[in-house]
Image (cartoon, rainbow, N blue to C red):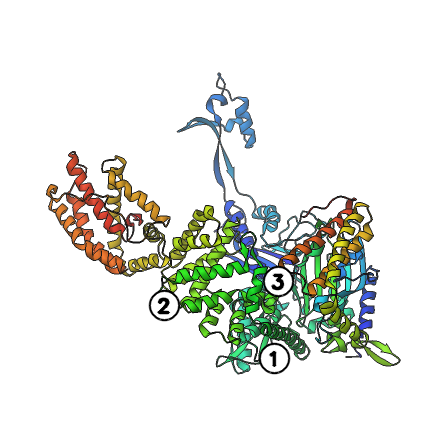
């Protein structure tokens, strides 16, 4: 065990936005870990903590010095490193100098490229405090934030908000490092009002407790648990239970250092739509609500940051502000209801949807047509409901309520509420309401939700703003994932290629982006499936032959999962790899010309051009059974012939479990074939006949998946 | 608590406090503005690298907020206390909190938060980062470290505090409506905010929402836009800046009258912004055609 210390870094800041904190501290911890690792410094657990006013990393058991390591550096080739007399040349001397070595340390070493001059250098044994002091300034300024600012004097310095103090320790000692305008010290600060005096830390291990004494719960997990417990307690006291809102709890946890729950009265407003009430309170007051028997209680719960609060006075103001926001919401709703949705549908023609693509009115038209064509292939799809819902779907974007910043998240919901109040059928309202969710409860909702996102994705690609790297400003990846989820959850017969063709036809441009959009969608399908815990190689195997219809791909994979007994699949995969290899080799030697078609066909299918179950296999010649001279050949061929009708009907009916069972029954015969039969015999006629047999068998398997893509280990 | 502070006491106390912190007392500007930032004591003074500290009250006139004196919290014209400290001091937050204590607010017994609020004024080509300050859930101040003004990266970062004076007065006096705020005393009797501004609210609401002549406003906008460019080319900074302020106000009126479509809105904001940029450029380095950032 090397000698170790605890490392502590606290960056004291002016209140950093709630959403910035976790990614920032995570990045900070990762960078520190990397610096320690790269230098070979061993360490124990690395803890991340944060409040709005501090970013904290604590690393336990950090070694005092880094390990010694020897590195070999290669220099110029030997022929220029030594002169005719065997003395080191200028080049060699320079090389030695560049590594801080003497020419005496140089030596010649041969590798597969030739002889080179080399030198060994020992690194390490450096003090960890020096390492950290050198790297911390740049690490701190590399912390990623969505927005950064400059503040006073130091023009090169920027951060999410001004940095006001640094507290840094290595063991019992303050860890000093350079930072513009600040010197790291052993001082931190407690709660801004409850404990404004500086707190002196003697050792990092007492940091968390000393802050607690200063009314700061620095550990966000502890803070969150306390908030949740206090909220639940308060809700119970009101005679109900807390309506949980995970997102809001996370946000509130990042807004306070010392949480205290304050219970307030709502007064009236109980006839406002529940979502509006909840959203107004959540967005404006970051307040929680409680419910009893599915009905909201006329109260709200605020998480304050004030341990010495005078509840009577504060409560009054929270209540007044809530009332004023709810009055606004009530006003907007009444104004919107006066007008109704229909006139807004007309106004859509004057609102740009995506510049260069069309107006909101265009989008509404396309939504209608696209959805109707997608829905026409479905048994349970009410065209009238859909058309009405699509017609009204986007009107709420122009309502007073949704145009108000804090209520934009009510898009869809607001439309549904207004549609309901003007007497639209329940199914129509439901589809309007659910268009932005990823768990619609009807086929009409589902088709609306998918169509909307397909149009968004296509339009964004067409105007040249597809997601790139970590940047996805229009959340297209999330939208594509939602499309896949909805199709699969609701078992919809939607084909990506058909849908995309229709989208581009409606928009009337973007043919040149078709391939990119299709690629994006299938990539998202692949990712969605692997996220469902399907092994990536299985997903590959299925998508290679059936990647255009998400629900179909999913069904195949589910059958696999159901029948997976481990070993059996491994053996199938091994067999299919052999078949694939041997037939591919054959193709390369260009003997049975028909085999070209497999591969070109597969390529087509993965681009979504091919339609299901219409694979053209007549190009693979059938083997001539009179040429069989092993029983393993005839057994395999007969079995393959025998199961073919059942297999085709199973695939037709999408009974993939049955199809897979049929194929698995071929497996022992394939193995026996390879055990007993040598394919690549000199006699061309026999050889080709055996290759035809295998190719035919492979055709059968390819109806379900390309099993040769399954990774076999060992 | 002793007798609550009147509106005029609050103004005086805050002014005294900031004067004691080295600010010069400026006065409201002589033209309609939507926010105190439009006053040249803010907009122009933050553009250069010279130290500047000022405090002033500014009436913010917002036609879209006009409510015929019927809404207790929203009015056509409210009063802002504007403070600029350039460069922003290291204790910018503490100095601000101290000003609230100067008003007698025991901060430790309330819930005071610095809540993320990135400030942006598209018409001024300006943005900054900071917070809204919430006191028991009431937004009482906008606290911003300016980064850009007139699309120019500021050479020295200033801090701007914009106090919502009515909000603070309501909080201190415990009243529910802006109109009930005690402004001061006349002849031994309380004078309320409503006593002073009720008529103003009624009339300007009708004007902003109904009566303002939109054809004239459009022509006026076009005229002052051209005038601004002409004045910039002559190097006449202050009149050119006045034209920017006028355009901005005409835009606000047209917007409140519902005379501007969604697409036109963005385009019109851009036109004002171009003017603001041209003036800012003139202030920092002499005339030249502005290009959009």
| Number of other residues with Cα within 10 Å of mark 2, as a class: few under 14, some 14 to 19, many 20 or more | few
Does B30 sit left or right of A393 as displayed? right
Decide: is B147 above or below A91.
Answer: below
| Number of other residues with Cα within 10 Å of mark 3, as a class: few under 14, some 14 to 19, many 20 or more | many
- Pointer 3 chain: A
Front residue of this view, candidates B241 and B182: B241
Give residue A52's mark.
Answer: 3
| Number of other residues with Cα within 10 Å of mark 1, as a class: few under 14, some 14 to 19, many 20 or more | some
Sequence-wise, which precedes: disc 1 or disc 3?
3
Residue A37 position, x and y percent, is 50, 47
SS for tag 1? loop
**Could you confirm whether marks 2 and 1 are on the same chain?**
yes
Sequence-wise, which precedes: disc 2 or disc 1?
1
SS for tag 2? loop
Outermost right residue: B187
Residue B229 position, x and y percent, is 77, 49
Residue placed under numbered mark 1 in the picture: A266
Q: Are marks 3 and 2 in contact (CB under 8 Å)?
A: no
Is there any visible trace of residue B160 in the rendered image? no
Q: Are marks 1 and 3 in contact (CB under 8 Å)?
A: no
Front residue of this view, candidates A525 and B132: A525
- Pointer 2 chain: A
Front residue of this view, candidates A113 and B236: B236
Does A610 sit left or right of B57 as displayed? left
Decide: is A93 above or below A394.
Answer: above
Q: Quadrant of the N terminus of chain B?
A: bottom right
Residue placed under numbered mark 2 in the picture: A380
> Alpha carbon of mark 2 to alpha carbon of mark 1: how far?
44 Å
SS for tag 3? loop
Sequence-wise, which precedes: disc 3 or disc 2?
3
Res A627 → quadrant: top left
Does A601 sit left or right of B39 as displayed? left
């Amino acid at each position: 065990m090397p000698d170790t210390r605890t490392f502590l870094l606290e960056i004291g800041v002016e209140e950093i936005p709630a959403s910035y904190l976790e990614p920032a501290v995570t990045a900070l911890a990762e960078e520190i870990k990397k610096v320690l690792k790269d230098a070979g410094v061993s360490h124990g657990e690395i803890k991340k903590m944060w409040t709005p006013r501090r970013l904290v990393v604590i690393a336990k058991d950090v070694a005092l010095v880094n390990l010694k390591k020897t590195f070999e550096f290669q220099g110029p080739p030997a022929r220029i490193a030594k002169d005719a007399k065997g003395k080191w040349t200028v080049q060699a001397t320079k090389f030695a100098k560049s590594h801080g070595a003497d020419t005496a340390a140089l030596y010649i070493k041969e590798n597969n490229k030739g002889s080179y001059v080399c030198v060994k250098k020992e690194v390490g044994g450096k003090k960890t405090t020096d390492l950290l002091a050198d790297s911390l300034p740049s690490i701190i300024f590399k912390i990623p934030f969505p927005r950064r600012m400059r503040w006073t004097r130091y023009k090169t310095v920027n951060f999410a908000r001004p940095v006001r103090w640094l507290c840094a320790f290595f063991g019992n000692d303050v860890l000093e490092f350079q930072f513009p305008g600040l010197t790291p010290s052993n001082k931190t600060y407690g709660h801004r009002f409850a404990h404004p005096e500086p707190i002196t830390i003697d050792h990092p291990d007492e940091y968390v407790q000393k802050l607690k004494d200063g009314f700061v719960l620095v550990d966000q997990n502890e803070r969150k648990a306390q908030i949740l417990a206090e909220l639940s307690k308060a809700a119970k006291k009101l005679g109900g239970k807390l309506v949980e809102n995970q997102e809001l709890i996370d946000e509130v946890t990042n807004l306070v250092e010392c949480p205290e729950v304050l219970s307030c009265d709502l007064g009236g407003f109980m006839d406002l739509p529940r979502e509006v009430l909840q959203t107004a309170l959540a967005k404006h007051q970051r307040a929680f609500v409680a419910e009893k028997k599915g009905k909201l209680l006329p109260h709200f719960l605020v998480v304050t940051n004030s341990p010495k609060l005078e509840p009577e006075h504060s409560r009054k103001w929270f209540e007044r502000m809530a009332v004023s926001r709810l009055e606004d919401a009530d006003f907007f709703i009444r104004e919107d209801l006066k007008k109704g949705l229909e006139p807004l549908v007309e106004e859509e023609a004057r609102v740009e949807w995506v510049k260069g693509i069309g107006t909101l009115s265009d989008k509404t038209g396309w939504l209608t047509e696209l959805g109707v064509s997608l829905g026409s292939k479905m048994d349970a799809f009410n065209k009238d409901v859909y058309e009405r819902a699509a017609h009204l779907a986007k009107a709420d974007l122009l309502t007073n309520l949704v145009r108000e910043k804090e209520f934009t998240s009510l898009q869809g919901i607001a439309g549904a509420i207004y549609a309901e109040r003007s007497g639209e059928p329940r199914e129509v309202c439901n589809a309007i309401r659910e268009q932005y969710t990823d768990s619609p409860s009807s086929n009409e909702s589902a088709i609306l939700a998918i169509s909307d996102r397909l149009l968004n994705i296509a339009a964004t690609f067409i105007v040249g703003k597809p997601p790139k790297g970590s940047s996805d400003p229009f959340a297209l990846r999330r939208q594509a994932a939602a499309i896949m989820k909805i199709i699969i959850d609701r078992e919809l017969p939607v084909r990506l290629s058909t849908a995309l063709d229709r989208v581009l036809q409606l928009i009337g441009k973007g043919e040149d982006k078709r391939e990119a959009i299709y690629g994006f969608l299938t990539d998202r399908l692949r990712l969605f499936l692997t996220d469902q815990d399907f092994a990536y190689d299985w997903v590959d195997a299925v998508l290679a032959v059936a990647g255009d219809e998400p629900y179909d791909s999913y069904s195949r994979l589910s059958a696999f999962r159901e029948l997976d007994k481990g070993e059996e699949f491994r053996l199938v995969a091994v067999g299919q790899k052999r078949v694939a290899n041997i037939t591919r080799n054959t193709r390369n030697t260009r003997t049975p010309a028909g085999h070209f078609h497999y591969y070109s066909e597969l390529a087509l299918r993965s681009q979504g051009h091919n339609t299901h179950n219409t694979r053209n296999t007549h190009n693979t010649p059938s083997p001539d059974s009179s040429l069989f001279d092993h029983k393993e050949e005839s057994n395999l061929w007969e079995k393959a012939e025998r199961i073919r009708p059942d297999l085709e009907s199973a695939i037709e009916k999408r009974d993939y479990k049955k199809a897979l069972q049929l194929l698995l029954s071929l497996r022992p015969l394939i193995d026996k074939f390879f055990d007993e039969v040598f394919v690549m015999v000199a006699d061309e006629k026999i050889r080709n006949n055996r290759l035809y047999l295998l190719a035919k068998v492979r055709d059968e398997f390819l109806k379900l998946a390309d099993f040769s893509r399954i990774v076999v280990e060992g | 608590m002793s007798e609550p502070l009147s509106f005029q006491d609050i103004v005086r106390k805050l002014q005294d406090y900031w004067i004691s912190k080295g600010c010069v007392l400026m006065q409201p500007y002589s033209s309609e503005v939507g926010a105190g930032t439009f006053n040249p004591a803010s907009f122009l003074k933050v553009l250069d690298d010279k130290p500047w500290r000022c405090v002033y009250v500014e009436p913010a006139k917002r036609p879209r907020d006009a409510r015929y004196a019927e809404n207790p919290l929203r009015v056509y014209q409210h009063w802002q206390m504007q403070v600029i400290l350039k460069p922003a001091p290291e204790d910018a937050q503490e100095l601000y909190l101290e000003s609230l204590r100067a008003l007698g607010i025991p901060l430790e017994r309330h819930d005071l938060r610095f809540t993320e609020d990135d400030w942006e004024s598209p018409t001024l080509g300006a943005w900054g980062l900071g917070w809204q300050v919430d006191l028991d859930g009431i937004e009482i101040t906008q606290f911003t470290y300016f980064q850009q003004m007139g699309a120019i990266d500021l050479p020295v970062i200033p801090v701007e505090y914009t106090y919502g004076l009515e909000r603070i007065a309501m909080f201190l006096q415990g009243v529910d409506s802006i109109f009930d705020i005690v402004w001061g005393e006349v002849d031994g009797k309380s004078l309320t905010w409503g006593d002073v501004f009720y008529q103003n609210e009624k009339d300007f609401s009708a004007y902003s929402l109904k009566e303002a002549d939109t054809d004239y406003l459009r022509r006026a906008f076009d005229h002052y836009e051209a005038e601004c460019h002409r004045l910039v080319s002559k190097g006449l900074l202050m009149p050119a800046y006045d034209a920017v302020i006028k355009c901005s106000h005409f835009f606000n009126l047209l917007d409140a009258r519902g005379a501007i479509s969604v697409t036109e809105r963005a385009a019109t904001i851009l036109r004002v912004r171009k003017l603001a940029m041209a003036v800012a450029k003139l202030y920092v380095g002499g005339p030249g055609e502005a290009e959009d950032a």
